[in-house]
Amino acid sequence: MISREKLLVSIIGIVFALWSTLDIVFAKGTQNIKMSATFQKQKEQYLIGEPIGVLFTLQNQSDSRVSFYIGTTRDDGFRFSAVAKQKTIQQLNPYNPEGAPVPTIRLEPSEAYKQVVFLNEYLLFELPGTYTVDCAIDIHVLPITDMKKEGIYKISIRDKVTIELYQGSNSEIQDIIKELESKLQSKDRKIRVESARALGSMRVSPVVGPLGRALRNPDGIVQWHVAHALAKIGTPEAIEELANVARSGDLAARETAIDWLGYSGVKTTIPILLNLLEDSCSTIRYAVLRALSNVGDQSCIGEVQKKLDDPDERVRSLASQVLEALMRK
C-alpha cells in the first residue's frame, strides 16, 4: 500500500494539507477547491524489463468544475527518484519533445482524472530487489474565471511507493509483449493507448514490430501515442517504421508519423524528411516543414529555401518562418 502520511503539498496560494488523507484544500480569491490525489502501483511484483505502471489519480471534490494542466511543452510534470539498498537509482531523461501539446483538463465535481505512468521511462531498473520510489507531480490550476492561463497557480504533490522487482526469463518478457500487442487491438481506446505507451516504455527492439503495425490504426489518438513510442525508442528500426507510414497511408497517419520523425531528435530522419518535402500533397509538405523546424538542423536550409516558391501559399509562408528560425541557430 502507498504511504499516505508523507504526502507533501506545496502551493502558491493558501494551502491546507490534511495529513490523514491525500486531500488538497486551497483557496485563491473567490475560488475554493478541494481535490484528492494518489499514486498507486498496479501490482505487487514486476519482472525486470516489463513496464512498471503507477496509477496517478486526481479527483475533484469541489462543488464546481476545476481546470488544470500537467507539465509544460518541455516537461510532462512527473518526477521520480528511487533508492534500493541505500543506493540511488540512475534517472533517465523521459522523452518529452519540445512543442508537444499540453491539453487543459476539466473535472466536474466528483470526477477523477487518471493516468498510468511507466517508471521505466524515468528510472533505470537493472537488478532485482525492493525499490522505494519517490513520486512527484506539478499540477497547474487555472482560475475558474480565466481560461487564458493567466493567474495560474501550481500544486506540487509528493508520495512514495515500494516496488518489488525480480529476474525473469526472455520468454516471460516475450509473453508480456504479446499480451500488450493483443491489447493494441482492444475496442477500448484507453486500453489501446495505454498498451502503446507500455510497449514504448520497454525500449527494446522486439516491441518495434507490434508498434509499427499499430501505427496504421485508424484512431488518430492511438496513432499519436504509437508514433510517440516509436520516436522514444529511436532505433533505426523504429525510425524506419515511422518513415514507412510517413511515405504512404492515410493522410492523418502520414502527418502524425512526420511530426514524430521531427520530434525524435534523430539526425537520420533528415534525409527522410527532405525526400518527403517533394511530396505532391501540400499538407504533407507543410507537415515536413514543421518537422524540420523541430529538428533544427542548418543542413536543411537549402531545401527549405526552395519551398519559398512552393505553389501552396501556406507552405510558402511556413517555409519563410522555418528558414528564419534555422538561420538564427
Image: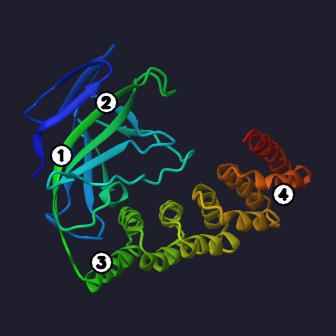
- Name above or below for residue 138 compared with residue 200: above
User: Which of 311/189 is in front?
Assistant: 311
Could you tell me which secondary element the residue under label 4 belongs to?
helix
Which residue is label 2 attached to?
155
Residue at 28%, 86% (x, y): give it.
Answer: 171
Residue 274 location, quadrant: bottom right
Q: For the residue marked with disc 4, what is the amino acid?
A: Glu
Which residue is label 3 attached to?
176
Please state if 272 lies on the left or on the right of 127 as rendered: right
Q: Earlier in the sequence, mark 3 or mark 4?
A: 3
Could you tell me which secondary element the residue under label 2 belongs to?
strand
Q: For the residue marked with disc 2, what is the amino acid?
A: Ile
Please state if 157 lies on the left or on the right of 271 as rendered: left
Point out residue 66 in the picture as x, y percentages from the top left corner: 34, 32
Q: Marks 3 and 1: which is nearer the front?
A: 1
Q: Earlier in the sequence, mark 1 or mark 4?
A: 1
Which residue is label 4 attached to?
303
Which residue is label 1 attached to?
160
Q: Are marks 4 and 2 in contact (CB under 8 Å)?
A: no
Q: Earlier in the sequence, mark 1 or mark 2?
A: 2
CA–CA distance between discs 3 and 4?
Answer: 44 Å
Q: Earlier in the sequence, mark 3 or mark 1?
A: 1
Please state if 229 lies on the left or on the right of 322 as rendered: left
Could you tell me which secondary element the residue under label 1 belongs to?
strand
CA–CA distance between discs 1 and 2?
Answer: 17 Å
Point out residue 95 in the picture as x, y percentages from the top left corner: 47, 54
Residue 248 location, quadrant: bottom right
Q: Marks 3 and 4: which is nearer the front?
A: 4
Q: For the residue marked with disc 3, what is the amino acid?
A: Ile
Q: Are marks 1 and 2 in contact (CB under 8 Å)?
A: no
Could you tell me which secondary element the residue under label 3 belongs to?
helix
Q: Residue furthest left?
A: 20
